[in-house]
Amino acid sequence: MVTEDFTKKPLPAITDIDREFWDGVNNNKLVVQKCLDCNTLQFFPRPVCVHCFGEKLGWQEVKGTGKVYSFTIVTVPRSPAFRKQVEQTGTPIIFAAIDLDEGIRMMSQIVDCKPGDVQIGSKVKAIFELVEGTDFKVPKFRLEK
Amino acid sequence: MQREGVCFVGYGETAYIRPKGEDRSPLRYMAEAIRLALDNSGLQKKDIDGLALISTTHPDDSPFVAEQLGMELDWLLRADFGGASAVISARRAADAIQLGQIQVAVCVGADVFRPVVPLMRAYPRVNYIEPFGYGGPNSLFALTQRRHMAMYGTTREQLGKIAVSVRRNAELNEHALFRTPMKMEEYLNARVVSDPVRLYDCVMPCSGAAAFVMTSESKAKQITNNPIYLVSDGEKSNYRVEDINTDWTVTGLRGISKELFTRVRHKEIDFVEIYDDYPIAILMQLEDLGFCPKGDGGKFVDSHDLTVEGDFPVNTGGGQLSGGQPGFAGGHLHVVEALRQLKGEAGTHQVKGARTGLVTGIGLLGYNVNLCSWSAMILQGDRAW
């Protein structure tokens, strides 16, 4: 049987490919891959450009602003630690796909609002939040007023 | 592509179950399904020279799996296309049969619902989805479902009609895991899992295996007077993946529907077996297969009776939503049900006049794309039941 850990939130298994992204997040910046051959942005970070197979990939900071492409109110998260959080706080998780203004999509969480406040098309902005029990930050989003 | 000279001659499946205590090894499920498929086709173990398999919960390399099953083979494939593995296995087997590499192929899927070995997980999911508290596939389909509802006005009642109709089909199918009638109110008021996805939108994992046997037309005619022909088939991986903001309400089936329907027209299809991890998945596939315009899936569902007695039977054995999802053997369940219909062996849930059926298989949730693997095929018998 696979054992479940109720204490630890899932953290990324950082590799050489995406270290720059997570270093950026932990310095309160959202940086994404940019192909130096064809100038296209891509997310998530990967070994080559999805458009031209280019291996020369740089990084560009994005504003962190965007709109909600879609969202779901998660009452039964997959991770045991998130499940415990939902049970203890009575507050479900707002998991969302965000279209950033620079034209890339990322999945994340929308925080500091009620589930009923979020709509497709709502404007959001990235924040950088410590994962509880660690000194590691992940990017989440807040509704823009 | 269009096919000539490749047939299906048999199928087999184990019970789909959720054992309380210790479960059997996936290999035992696999062996049982293969044995039943051979019995159904009138062939013997020694006749098999090709094997295509998928079992994520028994992750041995395929030669070791075949060794444990005691199978000498001229052709072996481990399919790794998730729920699309059944249809894609059939395509690969058809290639080998047409080329004359092999005479008889068995395609099998077997899984158990509580993995005994931790599975290796994908990098995009581990690093870019799981840290944000998602609810597994339920949440990813919830994102797509909400988008479809917002763009096209699709309602939960329309999705509920799919769930309730396939449950009706399952009531008549002794192989199905869930056979208790479901009312629309029960669907609509079910516990929220990942809004807008609720309990009866979600497929229930179980243990089980399913297999089918394919061979050349000439060999098929020696062993049966009712060979089931593979008419056309196609697959698409990572549809529009370069488009970094791809529309998640569009499926990869849009890219193959034209070649599927070259020889057979939509109105000739007597029933469909659509890979159904969620009702919204069925609805989007019906649109992209061309049964209705994009976005009109809800209206299409409203205007047809989807039960085995109806004018557009969908998932005639209850599909996975009511039949249970035996891991990645779930795709094989749909192929087996199509063959049961086309051989006239479906008993109480037989579709009247079934001669031509369509099967899809989809799998592997992506990051930039909704799902990575999409596949479909059209099967046809010589006679209508």
Image (cartoon, coloured by chain):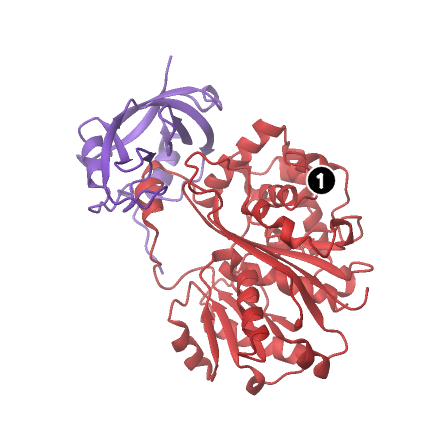
Chain colours: A purple, B red
| Position of residue A2 in the picture relative to residue B3 (left or right) | left
Residue in the picture at 71% in, 34% down: B299
Which residue is more in the foreground, B170 or B8?
Answer: B8
Rendered image quadrant of residue A35: top left
**Outermost residue toward the front in this view:** A37
Q: Position of residue A93 (x, y in %)?
A: 40, 32
Residue in the picture at 45% in, 19% down: A117
| Position of residue B352 in the picture relative to residue A137 (left or right) | right
Q: Position of residue B22 (x, y in %)?
A: 44, 67
Q: Is residue A69 visible?
A: yes
Which residue is more in the foreground, B198 or B359?
Answer: B359
**Outermost residue toward the top in this view:** A145
Q: Position of residue B146 (x, y in %)?
A: 54, 32
Labels in figure, total: 1
Q: Secondary structure at mark 1?
A: helix
| Position of residue A87 in the picture relative to residue A139 (left or right) | right
Q: Position of residue B295 (x, y in %)?
A: 63, 34
Q: What's under tag 1, amino acid-wise? A: Val
User: Is B284 placed above or below B4 here?
Assistant: above
Quadrant where the C terminus of chain B lies? Answer: bottom right
Quadrant where the N terminus of chain B lies? Answer: bottom right
Question: Which residue carries the number 1 mark?
Answer: B301
User: Is A66 placed above or below B154 here?
Assistant: above
Chain designation of label 1: B
Q: Pointer 1: residues within 10 angstroms few (<14), some, or many (20+)? A: some
**Outermost residue toward the bottom in this view:** B46
User: Is A126 placed above or below B87 here?
Assistant: above
Q: Is residue B24 visible?
A: no
Which residue is more in the foreground, B87 or B199?
Answer: B87
